[in-house]
Image (cartoon, rainbow, N blue to C red):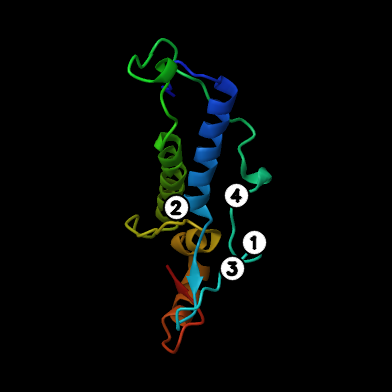
């Protein structure tokens, strides 16, 4: 990542890793649920999932670009900012490509919608097969839902 002349590479690398994992959580885990009356159901760590230590990749390579100073900034440095956060969108799109392949293998159309966050439940329902075909009628049966996703 281009950070100019890093003031403290260890801190900058930690910021990059943290921003990526924050984005990973946003794209794959952090789902807000509401009751039909608008009450927030995903309150606290028991119902609102954020990335934990086990979600961090075992191999997580981060390097800083050398020789790209910023002469207009303090000590030629640059801010970490949003790039590593948005880089986590690559995880979402990789999941979407894997679902597309699974749907094709199962004989379903590869055209589908996957909303962020790509939670386990959304991924499972997007990977259509004989099991999801049995579940779909129960979802669309009418009545009042017990929760509403954001």
Task: Answer left or right for 33 relative to 58.
Answer: left
Asked if the residue at tag 4 contacts the one at tag 3, i.e. Cβ–Cβ closer than 8 Å, the answer is no
Q: Residues within 10 Å of mark 3 (few under 14, many from 20)?
A: few
Foreground mark, 3 or 4, reads 3
CA gap between label 2 and label 1 equals 28 Å
Q: Residues within 10 Å of mark 2 (few under 14, many from 20)?
A: many
Task: Answer left or right for 38 relative to 62.
Answer: left
Quarter of the image with the N terminus in it: top left
Q: Position of residue 5 (x, y in %)?
A: 45, 15
Q: Which mark is residue 99?
A: 2
Foreground mark, 2 or 4, reads 4
Residue carrying label 1:
45
CA gap between label 4 and label 1 equals 11 Å
- Give whichever of discs 4 and 1 has the lower sequence position: 1
Asked if the residue at tag 1 contacts the one at tag 4, i.e. Cβ–Cβ closer than 8 Å, the answer is no
Foreground mark, 2 or 1, reads 1
Label 1: element kind: loop
Q: Residue at x 50, y 70 (%)?
A: 33
CA gap between label 1 and label 3 equals 7 Å
Q: Which mark is residue 51?
A: 4
Label 3: element kind: loop
Asked if the residue at tag 1 contacts the one at tag 2, i.e. Cβ–Cβ closer than 8 Å, the answer is no
- Give whichever of discs 2 and 3 has the lower sequence position: 3
Asked if the residue at tag 4 contacts the one at tag 2, i.e. Cβ–Cβ closer than 8 Å, the answer is no
Viewer can see residue 15: yes
CA gap between label 3 and label 4 equals 16 Å
CA gap between label 2 and label 3 equals 29 Å
Residue carrying label 3:
43
Q: Residue at x 40, y 51 (%)?
A: 100
Label 4: element kind: loop
Residue located farthest toward the bottom when viewing the structure as drawn: 143
């Amino acid at each position: 990542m281009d950070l100019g002349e890093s003031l403290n590479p260890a801190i900058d690398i930690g910021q990059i890793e943290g921003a990526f994992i924050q984005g990973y959580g946003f794209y794959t885990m952090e789902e807000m649920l509401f009751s039909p009356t608008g009450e927030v159901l995903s309150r606290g760590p028991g119902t609102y999932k954020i990335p934990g230590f086990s979600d961090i990749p075992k191999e997580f390579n981060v390097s800083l670009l050398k020789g790209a100073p910023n002469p207009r900034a303090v000590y030629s440095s640059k801010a970490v900012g949003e790039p590593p956060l948005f880089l986590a969108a690559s995880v979402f799109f990789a999941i979407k490509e894997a679902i597309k392949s699974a749907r094709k293998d199962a004989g379903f159309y590869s055209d589908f919608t996957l909303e962020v966050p790509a939670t386990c439940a959304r991924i499972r329902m997007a990977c259509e097969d004989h099991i999801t075909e049995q579940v779909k009628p129960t979802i669309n049966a009418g009545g009042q839902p017990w929760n509403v996703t954001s």
